[in-house]
Image (cartoon, rainbow, N blue to C red):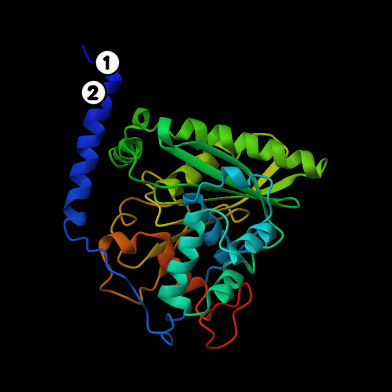
Amino acid sequence: MRSPSFWKRLFAFTAASAMLVVPFRFLTVNAIVRVPDAKPSASVSSVSDVTNGIYDGVLMKMTDLSYVNLAPEVGQSFDEMEREALTHRGPKSLLDEIERVNGMDWHETYAQAVNEFFSDLRGWRVLAVDNEESQAGFYAVAYQKGPDVVISYRGTTNNVMDLVADAGIYLSVPNMIDQLTPAKSFFALACNRASQAVHPSPIHVVLTGHSMGGWLAQSVYLEERKVSGPWVISGVIVFNSIGTGFQPMADPSVSVKDYHFDGDVFSRYGTSLGSVIDVPNPDPDASVYDKHQMYEFYHYFYPYADGIGPAPAAGERA
């Protein structure tokens, strides 16, 4: 006889497949190359693009890197990773992402693209990784620079457990979401490990995530914001989050921002804890799949990386 968990997962997989099949019926995966001098329209949002002194573009990169297995790089600085990348060493998926973004938006030499990618990540290091992708579909990575910590939660991949969790989120069935428990455990582990390096000063934490990872980041914030510990949650920044059941919060001491790429169908379902920022889409013909991906946000945060005009400083994006 099948166990209850088997039927739960079968139902969730069926529901998730039904929700995904319609939009992905129109999916086309094409190589995207943007016109070099095409810049995104200036954001009409009055919300600052700096969180706890960190440019949201940096947080976007760190969220994108949650899709790279950084377990072998724990303890390594981004300065070291940059030197390796210049000689085509390091995680292959990281090198592939740099080349993808360069081909789409920056149009520079490989060395210039590596420099652009790591330019505002220098000084940060990989603090911790929790890779439970095969067991629970969960992956998270933490970064540290002095008293500042960023925890990034990976979103949906092609893992069946991710589809189960997605279905649980969309259908508001909490016991189908196995990732929330390890997400909270990783938050505590990363914070305690980071605090050991700066004790007795408190650490300042920013939670980030993409897609389902954005839901996890917001959920962890709700769970941990009132827990006493050697940390202060200073912000929650998510990208194309599938936040459902959240009510906007009015706490001005914590910045909660949800960046939505124009045309992404998945993040339009549900609500967010904070300000929703619409990111202009320079390529309306992009596929449903592409519009949901993290690489689409580089053109927004780094519009001058292609060498036409100076790169913007934090808070000075066009």
Q: Is residue 285 left or right of residue 300?
A: left
Q: Relative to 145, is 192 above or below?
A: above
For this rendering, which residue is in front, 192 or 123?
Answer: 123
Tag 1: amino acid:
Ser
Instruction: Please report the residue visible at 59 percent of the width from the left and 80 percent of the height from the top.
Output: 311
Q: Is residue 142 left or right of residue 286?
A: right
> Mark 2–mark 1 contact, CB under 8 Å?
yes
Instruction: Please report the residue visible at 22 percent of the width from the left and 48 percent of the height from the top.
Output: 20
Instruction: Please report the residue visible at 46 percent of the width from the left and 47 percent of the height from the top.
Output: 154
For this rendering, which residue is in front, 305 or 71?
Answer: 71
| Residue 277 seen anywhere in this rendered image of the structure | no
Mark 2 is surrounded, within 10 Å at the Cα level, by few (under 14), some (14 to 19) or many (20 or more) other residues, namely few
Q: Which mark is on residue 3?
A: 1
For this rendering, which residue is in front, 205 or 293?
Answer: 293
- Residue 75 location, x and y as percent? 69, 46
| Residue 259 seen anywhere in this rendered image of the structure | yes
- Residue 89 location, x and y as percent? 57, 58
Q: Relative to 117, is 24 above or below?
A: above
For this rendering, which residue is in front, 88 or 229?
Answer: 88
Mark 1 is surrounded, within 10 Å at the Cα level, by few (under 14), some (14 to 19) or many (20 or more) other residues, namely few
Q: Which residue is mark 2?
A: 7
Calculate the distance from the C-alpha at mark 2 to the C-alpha at mark 1.
Answer: 7 Å
